[in-house]
Image: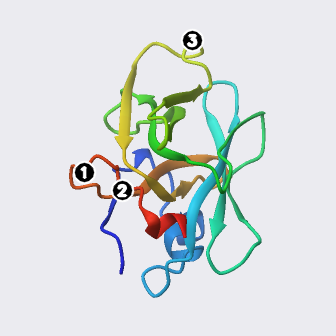
Amino acid sequence: MLPALVVSEAVGYATTSDPKNTFDDLKDVGLWPAHQYIKKVTSISVWIGAAKPNGIEITYQLSNTTQPSVQMHGQRSGTQKTVTVAGESDDFFVGIFGAIDDNPDQPTLRRIGFLVYNKDTGALTQQGPFPDATVTTKNIVGFTSLGLIVGFSGTSASNGNLDTVAVYKVQSGGSTNVGISKFFLN
């Protein structure tokens, strides 16, 4: 049975419409909807430039192989910051947050961070934002999207840098388990 999924609003500004610069890990890695191979996001690395994320690297635990799938979107340039949850642990990525320029026509992605939830203890941990919130504090607007993250989509600029990012997440329907079920743990 397919879980109910929703996609967050994409944040940032797509500077190109070239299909080669778009990514959709749910479709390309998980082969959704024909298959549901993404079991869990186990690691997210953000590559940080002078004042914005240049790239994002996501590691997926898959149900059809013991080998993880590592997907790089944007560039591996700048400082790397990694947030990891063990594949068999009770920790899950349940939120994305950050900031964009307040330019209504071309809002550039400026910061990105993640929330990690431990389903056994109920602990919620903030990881980020990347770069640090003190790097750029003027003329920005924050964003958040909450829910069990199962995949990423977005665009990269023609120069290779990350332009936009969105997350696919389990629609919780208001339940207290935020969508974390045996479906994703098996």
Of labels 2 and 3, earlier in sequence is 3
Marks 3,1: beta carbons within 8 A: no
Q: Quadrant of residue 143?
A: top left
Binning the other alpha carbons within 10 Å of mark 1 as few (below 14), some (14 to 19) or many (20 upward) gives few
Q: Which residue is mark 2?
A: 179
Q: Amino acid at mark 1?
A: Ser
Q: Measuring 69% from the left and 25% from the top, which residue is drawn there?
A: 50
Q: Nearer the viewer, residue 11 or 113?
A: 113
Of labels 3 and 1, earlier in sequence is 3
Return the mark for residue 35: none
Marks 2,1: beta carbons within 8 A: yes
Mark 2 lies on a secondary structure that is loop
Q: Is residue 140 left or right of residue 61?
A: left
Q: Quadrant of the N terminus?
A: bottom left
Residue 57 higher or lower than 140, as above or below: below
Foreground label between 3 and 1? 1
**One can see residue 113 in this view:** yes
Residue 48: where, in percent of width, then height? Answer: 69, 33
Residue 107 higher or lower than 9, as above or below: above
**One can see residue 24 in this view:** no
Q: Residue furthest bottom?
A: 34
Q: Measuring 50% from the left and 75% from the top, which residue is drawn there?
A: 27
Q: Quadrant of residue 138?
A: top left
Q: Amino acid at mark 2?
A: Gly
Residue 18: where, in percent of width, then height? Answer: 53, 67
Residue 148: where, in percent of width, then height? Answer: 42, 52
Q: Which residue is mark 1?
A: 175
Return the mark for residue 134: 3
